[in-house]
Image (spheres, rainbow, N blue to C red):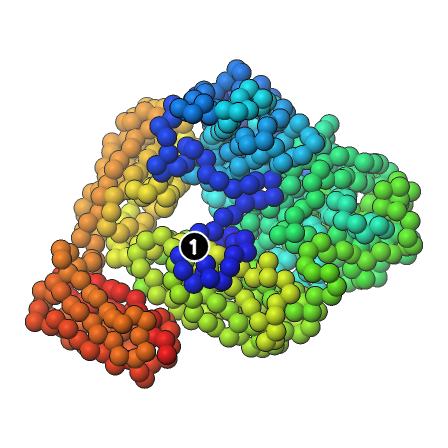
Amino acid sequence: MTRALPFALSLFLSAFTITLHGQLSFGGRAFGLMEKGPVLPVAPVAMMPTVDATPLLAEDEAKRQSGSKGPYRFGVNHAVDLGLDNSGVWHEFPNGDRLWRLAVECPGAFSINFEFHDYVIPEGALVFVYNDEGVQLGAFMAGSNPGHSSLGVTQLPGDRITVEYFEPAQVAGQGRLRIGQVTHAYRDVFRRAKDLGDSGDCNINVICPEGDDWRDQIRSVAIITVGGSGFCTGTMLNNCAEDGTPYFLTADHCLDANVTNWVFRWNWESPECEQNLNGPTDQTVSGCELLVNSAGTDVALLRLNTAPPPEYDVFYSGWDKSSTPAERVTGIHHPAGDIKKISHSEDPVIPGMMSGAECWHVQAWDDGTTEPGSSGSGLWNQDKLLVGQLFGGQANCDFNFNDYYGRLDVSWPLLEPWLGSCGDQLPGLGDSGPVGPVTLDAAVTSIVNIPALLCGPEFIVPRVTVKNNGSEVMTSVILLYGLLGDLPQIFPWTGSLLPGQTVNVDLPAVTVTAGEHILVVSSSSPNGMVDQVPENDWWSYSFIVNSPAEEVVLTINADAYGSDITWTLVTDLGTTLYSGGPYANVAAGQTITVPMCLTNGCYTFTINDLFGDGICCANGQGNYNIMNSDGLYYANNDGQYGSQQVDVLCVSGVSVGEIPGPASLVAYPNPSTGELFVELAGVQEQGVLSVVDALGRRVQEHPVSATTGRLSLELGGLANGIYTLSMEQPAGRAIVRVVLQR
C-alpha cells in the first residue's frame, strides 16, 4: 500500500498513472523491467558466500539476555569490490548511450542492501536497483546524495538483486560506481515468511489510540540501518534557530566505524491498530555526519546529509534540557526492527546509572515495552519534550521493568554548540504545510480490508483511515474513491475527530472485474472548507482480482533440506501471485500444501533448489504437484530437477467464464439520466440481466434469451452512482459498468 503523490482532480476523473518514489529516488523504470524494452545481455552474477544463521541467532539472543537494546543485528556484511571496470557487463545503444548491469546474489538471504563506496555520476545518468520480483529502487541520480561520493541503498526483499547504471553518450566515462559492501539478511526484515510483528505481543502500534496524543512526536522517529547490518532508532530534533537543520539524536552504542552511509526510514508504521500491517518502506534518506558523541550518556548527535522532503511530513521534536525528572514518560521506537511502536510509563523517572552512563531510569512500563532495535529512541516527558535516548535495560514483554535512557541534561554541554542556547525548553517544529497555523487538514493515511489477491468476488469494501492534522475538531470531510480510470464516487463522512486523531471509515462496496486494479481515495472539504495541506489527501492501493476463480493446491513433498527450497507462481504479465520458502530442515521430510486461487490464463511456476540436487533422491523421496479439486494435474514432477524446474500451466473453463465468441453487452446512453437501452448479442440460452449497485446488491433483474435483442431499463428510481450490468447464462457472463447521473 502506497501513498500517491499529489495530482489534479481532473486526472482522477479519467485514466491516470501514479508515480511513487522516495526522496533519494527520482522515478523512472529500469531497462531490465520494461515489458517492451531493449534486448539486453544477461547480467553477470556476483555470488556472495553462504551464511550460517544458527550461531548468529544464538549470539543475538545472548546479547539480548544481557540487557542490550541494540543495534538489532539482522544481517552479515560482505566486503566486496564491484565496479564499472571490473564486473558487470556494458551494452551500448545505437545512439551511443550505454548501460551497465550487474546481478548480486546472496544465497538464502531474506533481503539484500548494500553501499556504494564510490558514487560519482554525472548529470543525466541514472542508477536503478531491483529484485527478481520487479520491486525497484531508483532512479538514483547526481542529486541523490549531493556533495558526497558514497551512498547507502536500503533493503530489497529476496536473495538476488540487479544494479543498472545508464550513462548518456554526452557524459560517457564520467561516472564512477563501486559497490564496497553487500549485506546478507539472515533475519526476515520484511516479515515475508511470517506476519509483521516480530517484536513482543505487548508492543503497541503507533496508530492505536495510545498514540493519538503523540502524532507529532511519532513523525519525528526513524528506523536506522546502521553499518549495513543492524537496526537502531532515533529522533529528529529542533534547534534554537528553528531553521529545519536535520539534526538527529540516537545512541552512542549504535555507532560503527563509519556513519557515512547510514540509511534513515520514516513512517514505517502499521495503518491498523490490531493488525501488524506493512507501511511505506521507500521514505528514506541516506548519509549523515557524526557531530558529537559520548559514552558518558550514551549520546550521539548526527546531521543528515539531506533533510527529509516535505512529503515525508517529518516533525522536528522539541526538548527539555532541565534536570527535573519527568513525571511520566513515553517512548517511540522500532523494537526488533519491527514497525513503529509506542510505550508509556505513568510513574516518574529517577536518576540512575548503566555501565557507567548517567541515565534516566524508567522503573516500569505500563503500556508496551522496548527491545533490541529500540536503541537510541527518544524518551519524552509529560509535556511532549524529549529528555533522553535509550541505552539499554531489562524490560521486555515478560519482565517489563528497568530501562535506562541517557540524560539530555547531562549531554547538553556537548549538544549546545549545535542546537543553540534558548532556555531549558524548546517546542517542536513541523517542516511541511503552509506558513501559520493549520486549522483544517484532513489526510488519508491508509487503505485496508482488501487482500492483495482476491479470489472470485464481484466487489470490494475498502476501509480507509482518515486523520485530522488540523488544530480544529473535524466534523465532516468528503471522500472521493474509485478504481484507477473510473469515475470516482463520493462518500460524505461526519462525526467528531479531535486534532491528531484518526478514524477508520468503511466505504460502500466497489464493483470489480478480473485483472489488476489500483484503488484511489482522496479527502477534501474538511468542515466544508478548503483543505490547507492538499499534499496528504491521496492514497492508493494495488490489488489483483481472479474472477471467475478456481482453487488449486500446490503440494510439495520436501526432502530433508527444506531450507534449499524456494518457489514462485507468476502471471503471464510477470506479476508474482504466490511465493514460498525457504522451509525448515526436517530429517524425515515434510509435506507443504499451499492453496492458490487462479483464473483463466497461463502461469509460470518456478521451483529452485539452493544446493542444486532437487528434492529427490539422495536426501529423501520428494516431489511436487499442482492439482484442482477434481484431480486434474496442472503440474506434476518427481523432484529430480537439479537447481531449477519451470512449469507453464494454463487454466481454462473456470467457473462462469466470460461469454465466448461474438457475444456483447452494450448500454447507452452512458452516463444515463434514468432511461437506459441495452443491446444484447450472442445470448445462446435462457439467462438473467442484473443491475448491481455499489454495495453489490441486485436492484433489478430481467430475463433474457436468444431472441432478446434490445431492452429498455428504467433506472430513474435509483440513486446517482456507478452500477454494473451483469448478463449471466450457463455459457458464461458479460458485464459492463454504467453511470447514473442526473
Q: Secondary structure at mark 1?
A: loop
Percent from the top left, x then y, of residue 73?
63, 36
Location of residue 296 with respect to 79 vertically, above or below? below
User: Which image quadrant for residue 633?
Assistant: top left
| Left or right side of 264 for 682 | left
Residue that mark 1 sits on: 16
Q: Which residue is more in the foreground, 5 or 652?
A: 5
| Left or right side of 600 for 163 | right
- Quadrant for the C terminus in the image: bottom left
Q: Amino acid at mark 1?
A: Phe
Measuring 66% from the left and 27% from the top, which residue is drawn there? 149
Q: Residue furthest bottom?
A: 717
Measuring 69% from the left and 60% from the top, which residue is drawn there? 434
Percent from the top left, x then y, of residue 59?
64, 32
Location of residue 374 with respect to 667 vertically, above or below? above
Measuring 61% from the left and 70% from the top, which residue is drawn there? 530
